Image: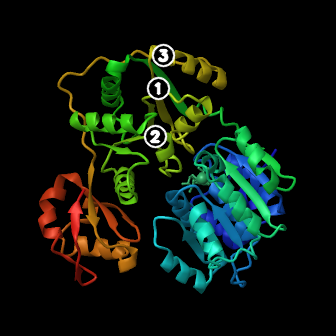
Amino acid sequence: MTSSSFSALPLSPAQLDNLAQMGYAAMTPIQAQSLPLILEGRDLIAQAKTGSGKTAAFGLGILHRLNPAQWAVQALVICPTRELAEQVAAELRRLARAAGNIKVLTLTGGASARPQVESLAHGAHIIVGTPGRLLDHRDRATLDLSAVRTLVLDEADRMVDMGFFAEVLDLASTCPASRQTMLFSATYPDTIRQDAGGLLRDPAMVQVDTAHVAGQIRQHFHEVTDDRRFEAVGRLLLQHQPASALLFCNTKAACADLAAWLAHAGFSALALHGDKDQRDRDDVLAQFANHSCTVLVATDVAARGLDIPALPMVMNVDLARDPAVHVHRIGRTGRMQAHGLALSLCNADERHVAARIEKHQAEPLDWVALPPPRAGKAPEQAPMVTLLILGGKKAKLRPGDLLGALTGDGGLTREQVGKISITDQVSYVALDRRIAHQAFPRLKNILIKGKPQRMKLL
Ligand code: ADP
Ligand code: MG
């Protein structure tokens, strides 16, 4: 039996303290299985569903092999998207607090390259990036990979899907052969088995059964006809009233249509799909994460890597064609110790897909009748509204500056201000919906760090 206490691992007392401070009381199953091997220096292929704690598994491995006194890039983490890279970097920085002055730098597309070059010139221990931008820097010789000891491919399945794998292989070929290589993935299709084979030396395989998500997640299947599908979504949302829900459609067009339909019906709903530009995506994600938007409608591609802990509800408005994708989708609810509800709509043509899911999970599907229409019952609005401020990290704004200004000159109470998140260029502040609109005229004239700021309500 593997112990699930971090203290069973060869970690420093400072790191154990740090993990306790982060609220990590025990290892997750994937951590318990992989960390002993990772800390030994083994190459590794690890497969576990989203939200199972893979980042800390490789993060602790990276830090274990890192020499803080050596100012060279000692670890490279390749991720499929900018959002994922930012999330991974944030987690690495938290883990690195125990180890002193460790610089974690993200190199992703969408941001301009010049400041990245400057940051690289100042030195970094750990680089987290997306394949294209990493290759740019390598090819311009602004990124030196010759001291890399640990190479991590995160969400490898996604990188294969997005056609990035050739670039990943190219990057790996520049890292020293003596490195430790770890591949993390939510699914492990044969394509990766073949493509990545040459990257790893005698890899250990660690798998936390992805099909075994039952228990924490209640799954219901509902029969629908296509002309009633959106209406069924509305009825189910009214019935369950989730504080937030992630809805999956199979196409971008369906996402946009459903979000528009729901918004028209009075739900706080937004769509997230690959066609949106980065700022639009950031706006949508910020609003969903801070409870200004209750319902997010997304494609699999767009939702990949979203790190929203403990979603109470996931709904498959269209069934995923691939049972592994279905399991991955519903795994976004019922994370860690929380319970979740996963609803799936299914028309007559999708019955065979449902049958495949049933076979895959080796458990009968729970078919439940749709609730009756609720005449006159209006959806609840999201509790918050997002204030967008057109200044962010680049303008040296920090959460304390914003909170101070909003509760000072802005006249708000602390309780009226919710989550504050700050990107390079902009800041998002959740405000209590009951006061946001009447407070706005006053807010837009306040000084933040002594300067007026442009802002608007999203
Ligand atoms: P994955 O990469 O497998 O999708 P993440 O690494 O993003 O999952 O972790 C999901 C969430 O679980 C994060 O919010 C992370 O902070 C949290 N987490 C990770 N390990 C632990 C742990 N041992 N105890 C509690 N929370 C954890
Ligand atoms: Mg991850």
- Quarter of the view holding residue 217: top right
Q: Residue at x 15, y 74 (%)?
A: 445
Q: Is residue 241 left or right of residue 187?
A: left
State the residue in front, 234 or 25. Answer: 234
Residue 142, disc: none
Q: Which circle, 1 or 3, is nearer the viewer?
A: 3
For marks 1 and 3 on the same chain, the one whose residue lies earlier in the sequence: 1
Give how far across and how far down residue 443 sits, in percent: 17, 69
For the residues labelled 2 and 1, the Cα–Cα distance comes to: 15 Å
Check if mark 1's residue and mark 3's residue have beta carbons within 8 Å: no
Tell me: residue 295, above or below residue 144: above
Which amino acid is tagged 3? Asp
Pointer 2 residue Cβ closer than 8 Å to ligand 1: no
Decide: few, some or many residues near mark 1? Use Cα within 10 Å; few <14, some 14-19, many ≥20.
many
Report which residue position mark 3 lands on. 349
Residue underneath mark 2: 299
Is 24 on the left-hand or right-hand side of 246? right
Q: Residue at x 46, y 65 (%)?
A: 110
What is the three-letter code of the residue carrying label 2?
Thr
Residue 330 placement (x, y as % from top left): 53, 35
| Amino acid type, mark 1 | Ser
Asked if marks 2 and 1 touch (Cβ < 8 Å), the reply is no
Dot 3 surroundings within 10 Å: few (below 14), some, or many (20 or more)?
few
Say which residue appears at 39% left-offset and 58% top-offset.
282
Front one among 91 and 158 = 158
The answer to whether residue 61 shows anywhere in this view is no
Query: In x, y percent, where is residue 296?
Result: 38, 42
Q: Identify the residue position indicated by label 1 in the image.
A: 344
Which image quarter is the N terminus in? top right
Mark in front: 2 vs 1: 2
Q: Is the residue at mark 1 in contact range of ligand 1, meaning its CB lies under 8 Å from it?
A: no
> Mark 3 or mark 2, which is nearer the start of the sequence?
2
